Image (cartoon, rainbow, N blue to C red):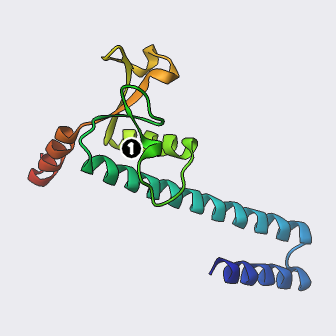
Amino acid sequence: MTNLIQVSNTALLEELVTRGFLTQAQSDTAFAKWMRSEAKAVKTRVIETIKRDILEAVASGTDRVYSVKKTSNSIGIIDLPMTVQADRGQILKALTQLTCNGSFRKVGLVGGVEKLPSEVNAFQIRYIFDRVTEVEDEADAETGE
């Protein structure tokens, strides 16, 4: 479908240039802007798919502490089954959005002790999935509190 839209957009821009409504430079700018918006939409869909996959995998598991890659005291999100091929950056972006949504808590984990993420280095960042918090949030939403 994208190819059909691309052809029709290209044909429309060429027709507008031919009739003198647009210059070639304006046409090229409009086409580049459209291509950037398409690429952004694809990236957004991939991140949303990764977020859904992470939540499904984590909700069905018994583990609580996660990181982007596997460590000695946490499960690597990158090793979980995904419907799309995801790299480290995409997983990190999805985890950041899930943290903002409240699905995960971002903590620093040093020797089994939780610290603020700003107090530890990047290799000590972990993501805590609290099922109890999510169940309480859903119950509060249902009761309207």
Which percent across, then down, holds residue 61?
Answer: 26, 46
Whole-percent x, y for residue 23 in the image? 90, 72
**Foreground pick, 59 / 104:** 59
Dot 1 amino acid type = Leu
Quadrant into which the C terminus falls: top left
85 sits to left or right of 114: right
SS label for mark 1: helix
- Quarter of the image for the N terminus: give it: bottom right
Number of disc labels: 1
User: In the picture provided, is 21 more to the left or to the right than 66?
Assistant: right
Neighbour class for label 1 at 10 Å: few (<14), some, many (≥20)?
Answer: some
User: Relative to 73, is 141 above or below?
Assistant: below
Measured from the top left, where is residue 19 in percent x and y?
89, 86
Residue lying at 77% horizontally and 63% vertically, measured from the top left:
32
Residue at position x 25%, y 51% in the image: 60
Instruction: Write down the quadrant of residue 11 in the picture.
Output: bottom right
Left or right of 79? Residue 38 is right
The answer to which quarter of the image holds residue 42 is bottom right
Q: Residue 19 or 72: which is nearer the viewer?
A: 72
Relative to 114, does residue 58 appear above or below in the rendering? below
Residue located 55% across and 41% down the image: 88
Farthest left residue in view:
143
| Residue holding disc 1 | 98
